[in-house]
Image (cartoon, rainbow, N blue to C red):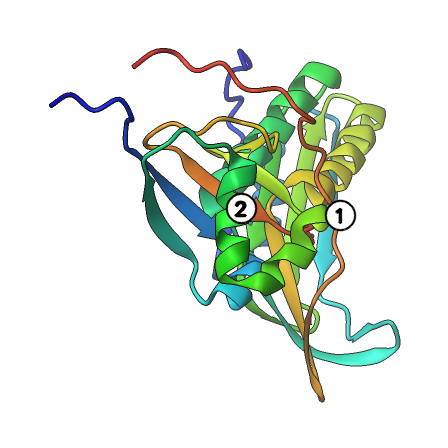
Amino acid sequence: MPSVSQTIRVKVLFFGRLKEIVGHAEESLEFSDAATIEQLFAHFATRSPELAKFRSSLVASCNQEFAAWNTPLHSGDEVAFLPPVSGG
Amino acid sequence: MSTPLHDDIYKLMREPIDLAALARHVRAPEDGAVVTFDGFVRNQSHNRPTLYLDYEAYESMALAKMREIGAHLHEKYRIHRVAIVHRLGRLEIGETSVFIAVSAPHRAAAFDACRFAIDTLKRTVPIWKKEYFEDGAVWADGELPPAPAATPRAKPAS
């Protein structure tokens, strides 16, 4: 039977203090409905509530490019949540 | 970006950075100036003695952003070669964490480009440092890179 929804698989990366909160640096996630980066973050914030308070001081990236929170996800995307950068 | 490579160097590394080799690399007979920036580990942070720093990066994106900075330098300034190298892992006091070298026929462009490069790197390249003190460790206060507000990217159909 043909399925109306399409499975989306994305790779998610965490850095700095986010990695410490989540407990690991990367994971793969599969979901069955269209979703945005914002919804992806909400998923992790539900699982690790401490993440939520960092939402306003993060930027997201999609495939190594800074991305808006409403960016729709596509299968194969690599999404990262980036705390304020402090290189140099 | 359409800018050619210009013999530039963009690198993340876990071993000590060879500053002299990078300064030599950008230097060429047609140039008249090399400006370098040597960023190294300070022994204190907000008057607290620092023990050491630990740097981590989103390596693929950090390299892409460093190359983007270089491409921008070539578009904006009359310069010749660029080297931008950042260290990762544990760094002791006094060790170089970031080194930038820019060559140009004339000094003004080299100064301006080098300043622009370090300022932009600190704002946009996904690298983080954790500062270790006698009584604990903290992630350094950083800068939030500018990100698009709400523009869904176009993606070619696959």
Q: Please report, as a chain letter, where disc 2 is located.
A: A
Q: In the rendered image, which residue does mark 2 sit on?
A: A41
Nearer to us in this view, B132 or B153: B153
Residue A54 position within the rendered picture, expressed as x and y whole percent measured from the top left? 67, 55
- Given residues B47 and A27, the one toward you in this image is A27
**Amino acid at pointer 1:** Glu
Q: Distance between the residues labelled 1 and 2?
A: 20 Å
Amino acid type of the residue that numbered disc 2 sits on in the rendered structure? Phe
Counting other residues with Cα less than 10 Å from the Cα at mark 1, is it few (<14), some (14-19), or many (20 or more)? some
- Neighbourhood count class around disc 2 (C-alpha, 10 Å): few under 14, some 14–19, many 20 upward: many
The image position of residue A83, as x and y in percent, is 64, 52
Query: Against A68, is B92 above or below?
Result: below
Label 2 secondary element: helix
In front here: B121 or B157?
Answer: B157
Residue for point 67% across, 26% down: B148
Quadrant of image for the N terminus of chain B? top right
Secondary element type, mark 1: loop
Q: Label for residue B143?
A: 1
Quadrant assignment, res B111: top right
| Residue at the front extreme of this rendering | A1
